[in-house]
Image: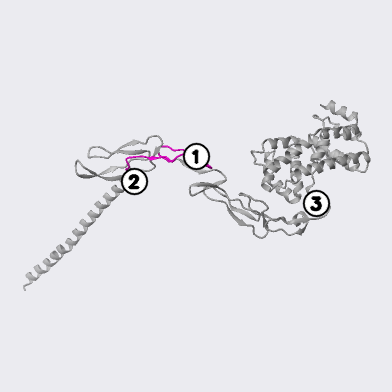
Amino acid sequence: MSARAAETHRSARPAAASKRLRFPGTTMNKLLCCALVFLDISIKWTTQETFPPKYLHYDPETSHQLLCDKCPPGTYLKQHCTAKWKTMCARCPDDYYTDSWHTSDECLYCSPVCKELQYVKQECNRTHNRVCECKEGSYLEIEFCLKHRSCPPGFGVVQAGTPERNTVCKRCPDGFFSNETSSKAPCRKHTNCSVFGLLLTQKGNATHDNVCSGNNESTQKCGIDVTLCEEAFFRFAVPTKFTPNWLSVLVDNLPGTKVNAESVERIKRRHSSQEQTFQLLKLWKHQNKDQDMVKNIIQDIDLCENSVQRHIGHANLTFEQLRSLMESLPGKKVGAEDIEKTTKACKSSEQILKLLSLWRIKNGDQDTLKGLMHALKHSKTYHFPKTVTQSLKKTIRFLHSFTMYKLYQKLFLEMIGNQVQSVKISCL
């Protein structure tokens, strides 16, 4: 081969190789182009499918498949789309609904009225079915509402019941107890006797609290400043409007050992006007407890308190029931913290009386009997047990009785004398 021919051969090989290399590249470009077109179609299809959604429909006139719009919630399909017209939808009639995009030619009929122990959570409309939910205190089991389970003594609520779920109970662990049947109350911790300066005399279990005891000073922690009977005996002596020297007049006219000036000043500093009279009379009664004239008062007050204890002290209310009773009283409420302290420091027979005393002081020494009458009037609202309602009625009736009024006259008014009575009238 000549040099020129060899050169021609060398220059021709790259050209041929170049043609062979371009062919696969052209094929790849075509494939890439097709992929992009397909992707574009997919994106458009996805976008169209999102809003409004489509469905395939065979058009009998053109024998073509069309992509028709689905009907929105609250409507039904009146006519499929054609090559010329879009899908025609119409509104659902009253008591019928559709709640999603669809292709149905009829709406769904709303569920009938709610069943027993249910209420209408959402009323039926064109886009939603009627929604019923179980009333408070019940839950749905298959198709019926059943009352929430109540945990028995020794068991506490770990999950409160809801309209969809029953109450979950669990046995109280060591150191906790529950002495009531309740669908809401959890297990409560045993009282730590040492915190109150008391001794543990009986260890609690799952159904009973620790039993504490101690000396007289520690057992006075329940100390009720003025009992219901003392309030009933003393209240008539309290003027509606106070003069600055009212307490001094009362001190001077009470028979027997006088309350000293230092004690009077201490009472004035610590208590409101009306409470000052109560505390003064209580202190005077204590200082003269050995005198015959005061013994009669103490004896009758003790008889009165025994009757009140018989009427109201046996109620043995749970924590929740005590809280309901305090909520039913007008004015400022005795809070859960005070109730908790009372249940730990006082015997069950004293708890109501202690809480009533706290309520009276918290509300500017309001008349406790009037508060109890208010509570009794609203007893149904607060779901008092029948025994509590009866106890309140008997207590109020007893303290309002004509016999009590006669005791006021005989044991107190005559003893204090006309001078204090005249001062009281002049204050009105």
Q: Main secondary structure of the magenta part?
A: loop
Residue 53 lies, in percent from the top left, at: 32, 44
Residue, far bottom: 1
- Please give the residue where the numbered disc 3 appears in the rendered image: 219
Q: Which of the 4 image quadrants contains residue 259?
A: top right
Q: Position of residue 216 (x, y in %)?
A: 83, 52
Q: Residue beneath label 2, please?
A: 50
Amino acid type indicated by mark 1: Val
Residue under pointer 1: 120
Q: Nearer the viewer, mark 1 or mark 2?
A: 1
Task: Name the residue located 70 percent from the left edge and 49 percent from the top edge.
Answer: 340
Q: Secondary structure at mark 2?
A: helix
Tell me residue 391's x, y (percent). 73, 41
Please tell me which residue lies in front, 178 or 289.
Answer: 178
Q: Which segment did they paint magenta?
A: 102-129
How many C-alpha atoms fall within 10 Å of the one at disc 1: few (<14), some, or many (≥20)? some
* Residue 334 visible to an observer of this rendering: no
